[in-house]
Amino acid sequence: MKKIDDDGLTKRQDAVIRAVRESGFASIESMAERLGVSAQTIRREVIELSRRNLLERYHGGAGLPPGTDRLAYTNRRVRHADEKRRIAAAVARDIPDNSSVFMDIGTTVEAVCEALVGHSGLRIITNHIVVASIFCENTDFEIVLAGGMVRNRDRAVTGEATAEFLRDFRVQYGVFGIGAIDHDGQMLDYDYRDVQVSLAAMEIARQRFVVVDGSKFHGDAMIRFAHVSKIDALYTDTAPPADIAAQLDTGDVRLVVENDTKM
């Protein structure tokens, strides 16, 4: 007989919800592996939890239902906060004053913005309202905010209109946040609209910097958009697994590891 908790959930259903809450989305395959059950079993649980409005079903996985994803984004901002600050400081050291910079969406990119506040003469292009707000409140930088659809939970501006807007620009540096890096060096994200924007932004940047904390290695994101060989530098807080490190080496990507042993 299945054990039911006070919320009417089985132990496995509770574990599925916790897996999704950790990042806002979890793939069927990753949850099946994590819980030691079949993918079909996880699909059945997701269907039931979706019926009860506890999860939102997506192709290949599950996310948080409408109204709760804003909290998930807030939680991501504080998770690995020290690591993100170290990563951000390293990126800021490599972007000189008076540069033109594209700033992507994401909580690690927000940390980079805060680290860049002490710079002078930057010209910023971004599709992230939070990024624009940080710079508007703390600097006199020239700021261009891309047009497009605003996603409420994280105040990202995204979609095809945003991608088209960005293609009219050229910048010296692009700072990108991603959902995950797979074993074969593929960078992945959660939303195909964000992928469209990231691809357009990579085209306009002469130097492409990706910022990831160690939790993104072999993560759950499922939409491929570029191989790591297409970037110039990867900034992280922990040495990547051997398979990813090999892909970085083959692609001649500069690896910058900022961990607390350097403090």
Image: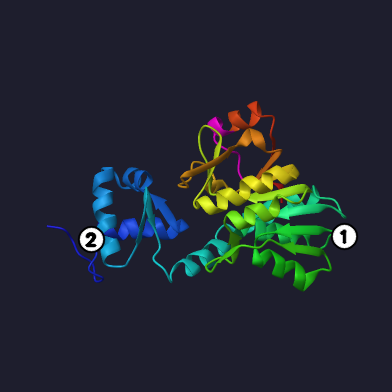
Q: Is residue 237 covered in magenta?
A: yes
Picture coordinates of residue 62, whole percent (x, y)? 37, 55
**Residue sitting at x 68%, y 48%:** 201
**Residue sitting at x 25%, y 45%:** 40
Q: Nearer the viewer, residue 11 or 57?
A: 57
Quadrant where the image shows the N terminus: bottom left
Q: Is residue 54 left or right of residue 134?
A: left
Q: Nearer the viewer, residue 38 or 197?
A: 197
For residue 84, what is the image quadrant? bottom right
Q: Amino acid at mark 2?
A: Thr
Q: Amino acid at mark 1?
A: Gly
Q: Is residue 73 covered in magenta?
A: no
Q: State which mark lies toward you, 2 or 1.
A: 1
Picture coordinates of residue 154, whole percent (x, y)? 56, 65
- Look at the numbered disc 2 and give the secondary structure of its residue: loop
Q: Is residue 160 left or right of residue 50?
A: right
Q: Decide: is 87 above or below 143.
A: above
Nearest to N terminus: mark 2 or mark 1: 2
Q: Is residue 258 visible?
A: no
- Residue identified by numbered label 1: 121
Q: Decide: is 75 above or below 164.
A: below
Picture coordinates of residue 78, whole percent (x, y)? 57, 64
Q: CA distance from mark 2 to mark 1?
A: 56 Å
* Image mark for residue 10: 2
**Residue sitting at x 23%, y 61%:** 10
Q: Nearer the viewer, residue 83 or 58?
A: 58
Picture coordinates of residue 64, whole percent (x, y)? 40, 63
- Look at the numbered disc 1 and give the secondary structure of its residue: loop
Q: Nearer the viewer, residue 181 or 213?
A: 181
Specify the segment rendered in magenta.
Answer: 236-244
